[in-house]
Image (cartoon, helix red, strand yellow):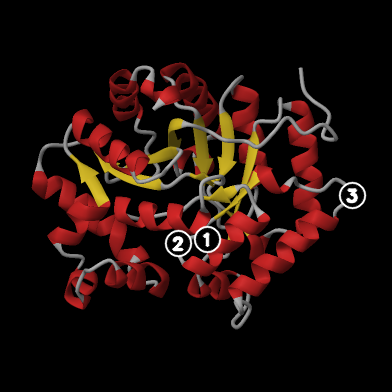
Amino acid sequence: MGSSPSILHGPLRPTGVGVWSVPLRYGDPGRAAEAAAELEELGFTALWLPDTGGSVLEAVENLLKATERTTIATGVLNLWMHDPAQVAATYAELREAHDDRFLLGIGVSQAAVVDASLEPGRYQKPLAAMRAYLDDLDAAPAPVPSDHRVLAAIGPKMLTLSAERAGGAHPYLILPDNTREAREILGAGPLLAPEQTVVLTDDADEARTIGREFLSGYLSFATYANKMLQSGFSSDDVETVSDRLVDALVVWGDEDATLRRVDEHLDAGADHVALQVLTGDMMELPMRQWRRLGAALGDRGATA
């Protein structure tokens, strides 16, 4: 089992539907591995792990060992917190050992997060920092192939860089209309794999409470707040995290509601949609909800 890192089997292009998950990254590794194996059997084609520093590549390896076919992706590795030479070396090892299934997602994060975690003023010129990081990955003894990495991108400059220097983009917290805009910037070739947040409940109050709590932190960052303002929401919508904004960003209801939103992203040009299921407890493995979605997806998990 395994393939030489010197042999490129083509770009990693997950299709259909995947899972984006905090507890798969930060929860108990044993339970995460068990969940990953079941998610593979349920038909989800990729598992995406967030990163705020630390052992994200160990978490990737844990899920690679637990699965046989599923793409394991960082969604995304924080470039300020990981040495590119070490990332490239570990990437090569994991790629050789696990059938070329590791997709490296890379992002610049937010100034408030980086400066608080590392040192004040560390976060500067994010686009230039991304270019330099990609240069370092390319210059490593075992380079990370450009078509085996994707960039966190929702703005036009980072999306353009995603097409020029990576295999595509992994936008987070966007609308189907934003997916359409991203596809227009990327062009026809690059991978486009947006994240979509989901609350599986028909109770509007419950869904909006969970969604609002989740969104409030992200919308305190200018990157996401400005994207919503550009998408037609008012400053009041953003500041209060209005019902209108929650309903737009967080799909809630039953499995059919989730499938409709997946289709909206796919129709807008996405190749793959990564579902982040919320329950109100960010560290809970939402196995019941994942099973419901897996049963509803059927073959769509792989072929949507």
Residue 102 position by quadrant: top right
- The amino acid pointed to by label 2 is Ile
In this view of the protein, can residue 160 be seen by the observer? Answer: yes
**Element type where label 3 sits in the image:** loop
**Element type where label 1 sits in the image:** helix
- The amino acid pointed to by label 3 is Pro
Q: Are marks 2 and 3 in contact (CB under 8 Å)?
A: no
In the displayed structure, does residue 77 sit left or right of residue 208?
right
Nearest to the observer: residue 178 or residue 279: 178
Name the front one of labels 1 and 2: 1
Q: Residue at x 34, y 28 (%)?
A: 290
Residue 221 place in picture, x, y as percent: 39, 72
Q: Residue at x 52, y 21 (%)?
A: 37
Instruction: Give the spatial CA distance, label 3 vs label 1.
Output: 27 Å
Give the answer, above or below, for where 229 lies relative to 295. Answer: below
Nearest to the observer: residue 232 or residue 211: 232
Q: Quadrant of the N terminus?
A: top right
- The amino acid pointed to by label 1 is Leu
Q: Are marks 1 and 2 in contact (CB under 8 Å)?
A: yes
**Element type where label 2 sits in the image:** loop
Q: Residue at x 44, y 52 (%)?
A: 183
Residue most extreme to the bottom: 121
- According to the image, label 2 marks what residue? 154
In the displayed structure, does residue 148 sit left or right of residue 142?
left
Residue 234 place in picture, x, y as percent: 19, 74
- According to the image, label 1 marks what residue? 159
Q: Residue at x 33, y 40 (%)?
A: 267
Residues packed near mark 1 inside 10 Å, few (<14), some (14 to 19) or many (20 plus) = many
In this view of the protein, can residue 53 be seen by the observer? Answer: no
Give the answer, above or below, for where 17 lies relative to 69. Answer: below
- According to the image, label 3 marks what residue? 141
